[in-house]
Image (cartoon, helix red, strand yellow):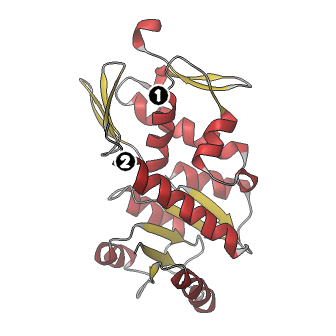
């Protein structure tokens, strides 16, 4: 049974979501004190976090930063705020998805299932390591290592990188990336993919690999091998 941490201060909504998720055999935990979210996070050790933006004490962005500083656990934002910058901010902070309130519960379930399948199934493949541009890409540990150091990636970032390097030197279309990352692309803006790829590229820049993820305008992205440049 997967453990989900639901960081939501609206008690009636929390109860409704928890009851519905329990019906799908998810074990749902809440927050006992909104000034001590990280303590509950450490105790629960969730497989996925669902977090509202507007919370007592500190907002969801603050707690997303705190969680990301300790863990790559998948995070879904759940918020009534509909400004595009909220979605962009959530993705820049490392969230895996964004669901706007009010929402259809089937949409939330679909997103949860898609993320859990992606995060906890693909790393069971026999091949965990891949060499790319002189770096060791560890699919299981979500890390990329070369002589300049090691960078840790989020689940989404590693999934994007995996798709690209498995098709190295070939363009992977935006549609293919979106369909692979999110089961139902009707609820995903094109900008969401751009934010995720840009964040991946920025992380890779720390070890000198950012330039090897190239944008093909109007087509998609390509992971280049060093010797082709």
* Front residue of this view, candidates 159 and 208: 159
42 left or right of 88 in image: left
* Front residue of this view, candidates 89 and 96: 96
User: For mark 1, does the 10 Å Cα neighbourhood hold few (<14), some (14 to 19), or many (20 or more) residues?
Assistant: few
Query: Horizontal and vertical percent for residue 140?
Result: 32, 45
Name the secondary structure under disc 1.
loop
Ranked by sequence position, the earlier of labels 2 and 1 is 2
Task: Name the residue at 41% across, 88% down.
Answer: 32
Between marks 2 and 1, how big is the CA–CA gap? 14 Å
Residue 90: quadrant of the picture: bottom right
Name the secondary structure under disc 2.
helix
Query: Horizontal and vertical percent for residue 152?
Result: 34, 43
Marks 2 & 1, CB-CB < 8 Å contact: no
User: For mark 2, does the 10 Å Cα neighbourhood hold few (<14), some (14 to 19), or many (20 or more) residues?
Assistant: some
* Front residue of this view, candidates 132 and 51: 132
Task: Name the residue at 53% across, 68% down.
Answer: 60
* Front residue of this view, candidates 194 and 135: 135
Query: Horizontal and vertical percent for residue 15?
Result: 57, 90
Vertical placement of residue 154 versus 162, above or below: below
Quadrant where the N terminus is found in the figure: bottom left
| Dot label at residue 123 | 2
24 left or right of 107 in image: left
Task: Name the residue at 55% across, 36% down.
Answer: 198
Task: Name the residue at 31% across, 19% down.
Answer: 134
Residue 178: quadrant of the picture: top right
| Dot label at residue 166 | 1
Vertical placement of residue 158 versus 62, above or below: above
Vertical placement of residue 207 versus 195, above or below: above
Q: Residue furthest top?
A: 228
């Amino acid at each position: 049974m997967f453990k989900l941490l639901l960081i939501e201060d609206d008690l009636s909504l929390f109860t409704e979501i928890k009851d519905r998720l329990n019906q799908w055999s998810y074990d749902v935990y809440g927050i006992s004190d909104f000034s001590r979210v990280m303590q509950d996070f450490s105790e629960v050790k969730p497989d996925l976090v669902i977090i509202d933006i507007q919370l007592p004490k500190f907002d969801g962005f603050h707690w997303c930063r705190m969680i990301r500083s300790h863990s790559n656990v998948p995070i879904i934002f759940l918020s009534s705020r509909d400004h595009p910058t909220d979605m962009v901010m959530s993705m820049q902070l490392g969230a895996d998805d964004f669901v706007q309130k009010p929402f259809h519960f089937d949409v939330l379930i679909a997103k949860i299932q898609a993320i859990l399948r992606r995060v906890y199934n693909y790393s069971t493949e026999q091949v965990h390591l891949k060499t790319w541009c002189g770096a060791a890409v560890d699919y299981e540990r979500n890390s990329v290592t070369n002589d300049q150091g090691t960078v840790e990636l989020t689940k989404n970032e590693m999934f994007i990188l995996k798709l690209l390097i498995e098709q190295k030197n070939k363009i992977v279309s935006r549609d293919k990336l979106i369909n692979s990352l999110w089961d139902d692309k009707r609820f995903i803006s094109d900008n969401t993919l751009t934010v995720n790829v840009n964040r991946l590229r920025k992380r890779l820049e720390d070890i000198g690999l950012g330039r090897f993820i190239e944008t093909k305008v109007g087509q998609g992205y390509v992971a280049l091998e060093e010797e082709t440049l």
